[in-house]
């Protein structure tokens, strides 16, 4: 019932809110699953009278038990102007694995500058998941990125993301998330010039091959969007 309500309401809300800094990011898992998958994601954020939406398509393929390669295409729509933003390539290596303990991976993503969406960027992420037999599943991600090319920002941009979820049904988890963007190492600024958001998440399986994730975030700093909604559907191929 929970997942049905969430999926019915999500398209309505996504179609009705505007965005200043909309995103499609999530608190991903370090666990590499065999085979390939494709994901469709949409995000929207409410901020004053500005409108905008973000969309992305991910293709992921495990090339071994502990390596996965991905290609990600990003789009956005601001003021009715739907456009391609960029493409990114990604590699992830899982180096810690446990059914009921700690899983961890290092992920490297590269974006080449193409004159369409600013400078290039390389991002390194450290993904962690703890799933005990009892209690919540915990996820924590640390990210550092560096831009290059014309128009680049100096220093390293730093982020953290966290999630705690509880199993509320055989194929459904419910919990809380936090997203923190600390600006760059050359100018961290104050709490209110950084982007900090907290909110809730519901996720689970719809079929053996199709899963979903819906998260709603509220900004707790001035630079963060007042409200964000992100929906992702993942199909195992």
Image: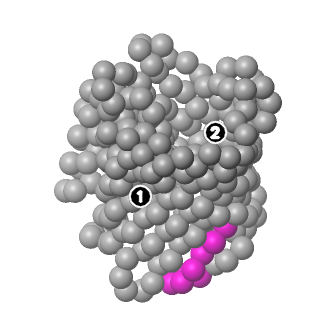
Q: What is the basis of the colouring in this image?
A: one colour
Give the numbered dot on residue 72. 2
Q: Residue at x 73, y 32 (%)?
A: 152
Seen in the image, is 143 located left or right of residue 219? Answer: right
Is residue 209 a member of the stretch shown in magenta?
A: no
Residue 203 visible (yes or no) = no
**Is residue 84 shown above or below 202?**
above
Foreground of the two, 31 or 110: 110
Quadrant location of the N terminus?
A: bottom left
Q: Is residue 76 left or right of residue 226?
A: right
Magenta-tinted stretch: 98-105
> Where residue 76 sits: x, y (%)?
50, 25
Label 2 or label 1, whichever lies nearer to me, is: 1
Question: Which corner quadrant of the image does residue 148 belong to?
Answer: top right
Which residue in the rendered view is the most extreme toward the right?
149
Horizontal arrangement in the rendering, residue 53 relative to residue 85 (left or right):
left
- Residue 84 in view, yes or no: yes
Residue 22 x/y as whole percent: 44, 34
Residue for point 43% across, 64% down: 163
Which residue is at a point 26% across and 34% down the rendered structure image? Answer: 13
Q: Mark number for residue 178? A: 1
Residue placed most toward the observer, 133 or 22: 22
CA distance separating discs 2 and 1: 23 Å
């Amino acid at each position: 019932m929970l997942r049905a309500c969430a999926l019915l309401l999500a398209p309505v809300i996504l179609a009705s809110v505007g965005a200043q800094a909309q995103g499609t990011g999530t608190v991903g898992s370090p666990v590499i699953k065999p085979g390939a998958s494709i994901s469709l994601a949409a995000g929207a954020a409410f901020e004053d009278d500005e409108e905008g939406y973000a969309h992305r398509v991910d293709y992921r393929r495990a090339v071994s038990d502990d390596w996965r390669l991905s290609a990600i295409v990003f789009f956005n729509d601001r003021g009715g102007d739907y456009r391609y933003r960029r493409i990114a390539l990604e590699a992830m290596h899982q180096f810690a694995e446990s059914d009921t303990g700690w899983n961890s991976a290092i992920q490297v993503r590269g974006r080449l500058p193409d004159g369409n969406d600013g400078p290039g960027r390389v991002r390194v992420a450290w993904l962690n998941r703890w799933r005990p037999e009892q209690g919540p599943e915990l996820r924590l991600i640390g990210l550092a990125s560096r831009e290059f090319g014309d128009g680049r920002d100096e220093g390293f941009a730093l982020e953290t993301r966290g999630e705690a979820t509880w199993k509320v049904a055989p194929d459904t988890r419910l919990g809380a998330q936090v997203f923190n963007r600390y600006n760059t190492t050359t100018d961290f600024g104050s709490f209110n010039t950084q982007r900090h958001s907290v909110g809730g998440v519901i996720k689970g399986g719809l079929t053996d091959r199709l899963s979903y994730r819906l998260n709603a975030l509220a900004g707790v700093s001035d630079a963060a969007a007042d409200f964000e909604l992100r929906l992702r559907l993942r199909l195992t191929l």
